[in-house]
Amino acid sequence: MKRLALTAAAVVATLGIASPASAVHEGSVYEAQLWPLNDSGASGTVEITVSDDGETMTVGVSADGLNLDGPHAMHIHGIVDGENVASSVCPTAADDADGDGIVDVLEGAPRYGGVQLSLTTEGDTSPESALAIERFPAGTSIDYERSGIPIPDALKPNLGKLHVVVHGVDENGNGTLDLDQDVRSSLTPDLPREGTAPAACGTLAAVATGPVQTGAGGLATDASTSNAAAGLAAAAIGAVALTATRRRRPAGQSAQ
Ligand SMILES: [Cu+2]
């Protein structure tokens, strides 16, 4: 029975992925918990709400404890190749490839991928604005919300594979962005490393908003409830199969 229940759960999960309700992300909500990188002290949350037509989204970023009282470039990152979006993760201190104590923006890129969207306060939100630090929030806390951000086609069904990265770290303890820092950003000599080193990263995940996603969430967080739900699903699927079998079975053939 347990195997049957798990199989049914897998069927339900598969159906969920294939069903229009979840294959299309319209109206979906995604959240991320922001965790600090590079001892930034930052923490926070991200909430993304996709518009009803699925074309744009509202992004909210709330963070505090940032040790840099300066500009914080913020992006949605992902490993994207044309229409293909790979799953990715947030970097850790272990990704400090050159061992200098800071995971710079490029050292983190193999984990969270490239910039897919720039969470600017105004104007363009494409990757071209990735370093437009005058159009990002600034300070030791962030209270950001912007609506109408266009979602690139490749990202529409893949928001749950993406990450939000907040950049800008104080390295020398003075709390401000040192434009003359000797070490330059791994992205551009125009900015100090403090300006682009990642301060926080969070993995986006779909929030349960519909019946299919509620079932998946239950499976992940509450085994007993989900097994019970899977059992009910198995019973329902079995009943359908049995009905079909009975209709097909010629008269006179006995059940096995
Ligand atoms: Cu970024």
Image (spheres, rainbow, N blue to C red):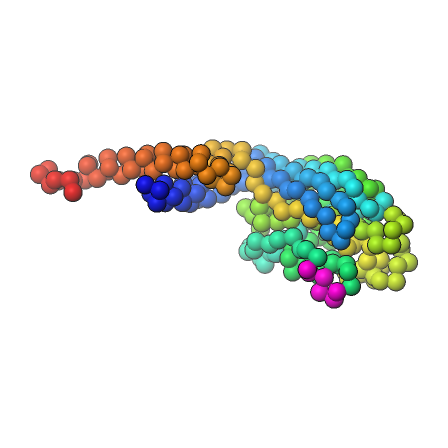
> Which one is nearer the viewer's eye here, 189 or 122?
189
Could you tell whether 122 is left or right of 164 in the image? Answer: right
Magenta stretch contains residue 245: no
Could you tell whether 92 is left or right of 176 in the image? Answer: left
Q: State whether the magenta stretch is mostly helix, strand or loop.
A: loop
Could you tell whether 91 is left or right of 189 in the image? Answer: left
> Which one is nearer the viewer's eye here, 147 or 173?
173
The quadrant where residue 148 appears: top right
For the point 76% across and 53% down, the residue is 38
Q: Residue 64 at what x, y percent from top left?
A: 77, 40
Q: Quadrant of the N terminus?
A: top left
Determine the residue located farthest toward the left in the rendered image: 252
Determine the residue located farthest toward the bottom in the rendered image: 98
> Which one is nearer the viewer's eye here, 8 or 21?
8
Magenta stretch contains residue 97: yes
Stretch in magenta: 94-99
